[in-house]
Amino acid sequence: MSERWVVGMSGGVDSSLTAVLMAEQAYDIVGVTMKLWPCAELDGGFVREDACCSPTETIDARSVALTANVPHYVLDMEDEFRAGVVDDFVTSYQRGETPNPCVRCNETLKFGDLWKYAKSIGAAGVATGHYARVVQQGDRYCLGAAADTMKDQSYFLFSLTQEQLAHARFPLGHLTKDEVREMSQARKISTANKKESQDICFIGDEGIDGFLRREIPDAFQPGHITLTDGTVLGEHNGVCAFTIGQRRGLGVAWKEPLYVVDIQMESNTVVLGRKDELLVTEAELRDCTWHLAPLSTEGLRCSVRNRYRSRPVPAHIFPTDNAGSARVVYDEPQTKPSPGQACVAYSDDGSLCLGGGWFIKEGTEAHNNV
């Protein structure tokens, strides 16, 4: 009897080819599309064909599954998605942070609730169309960077646990996007030429600002925009509309370029400063995950990415007195990271993702979940 695997099918070309490749290898495949957010007019959501859980995407996923002779199911996980991803997204902005919902979705939904479902039907694990690899070293697992460096998604998977990694499979990790397209076309997969969605799946045409104003209107109260010396430059209509490092759309004029260097939630103030006032040599992390070994007192020598598209920079990461927390010390000053974003650690050559954590505002209590 062949080994059973659940394949998360979003309706895009990547997950479609993943399901077909797994089926070609004679695995017992079960295709699953998760309904995470209301995306049709009839259930109160917005209409956007490329949203990952829209009716169009679900139909495409089912069509591919039927063609590949793979059973396909739709799981309603709107409540889980709201609690684990959307509520975290909203409350993070209320704390003056800039969250990354895709990381949360991977850890709580795709390799959390979907893995629970997979276990319930006797599956060995969950396969997805992410561009990454699972690498085993001894009895530990870590993430390997994808062959396609422009598509590598290990950053968004850094927080997966050892159990999740042990039961995860990424069949596209050794392929480039062009190769995925070519292989899909050769197999006549209906989604082979489908365009990709780059936006947050639960944000419609209103954008993040409009979404937050609807979800948390009380957080958008007028307040001061000041310089670091306290000089008042103007007023804003809500601190949630700003993020650390922001330069455009500040609503004030000054004799030199200014950037958001601090967001003071307690006083409802946005603080602006020069670019050099954004530079830091250290940053604090919470809710850390380390794949190959716990963080030792000697620290971890690595390269880190402060944002998904940022270039890796050399650093040392040390544990702190708070369990699950850490401090990253950069070799050279870096632009101040935004609280709520992920700091992801890589081997010096960039081939292995070693784990990481979430930036917190300097001096803020970590509030670890681990």
Image: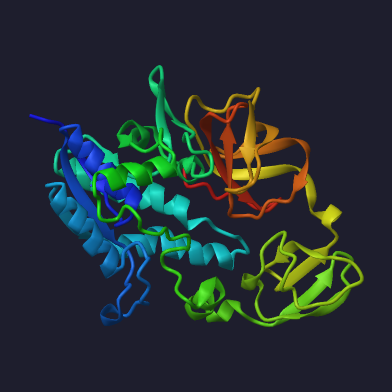
Left or right: residue 238 compared with residue 36: right
Labels in figure, total: 0
Q: Residue at x 47, y 63 (%)?
A: 199
Left or right: residue 64 compared with residue 342: left
Residue 328 percent location from the top left of the image: 67, 37
Quadrant where the N terminus lies? Answer: top left
In the displayed structure, 312 sits above or below 156; it is above
Residue 217, by quadrant, is bottom right
> Residue placed farthest to the front in the image?
186
**Quick check: can you spot residue 320?**
no
Residue 105 percent location from the top left of the image: 40, 53
Left or right: residue 105 compared with residue 20: right
Q: Residue at x 57, y 66 (%)?
A: 93
In the displayed structure, 364 sits above or below 90; it is above
Residue 323, by quadrant, is top right
Residue 39 percent location from the top left of the image: 33, 72
> Residue placed farthest to the right in the image?
255
In the displayed structure, 290 sits above or below 235; it is above
Residue 218 percent location from the top left of the image: 56, 80
Residue 261, by quadrant, is bottom right
Q: Residue at x 12, y 50 (%)?
A: 71
**Quick check: can you spot residue 163?**
yes
> Residue placed farthest to the top in the image?
138
Left or right: residue 183 compared with residue 20: right
> Residue placed farthest to the left in the image?
1
State the residue in front, 189 or 248: 189
Q: Residue at x 60, y 48 (%)?
A: 309
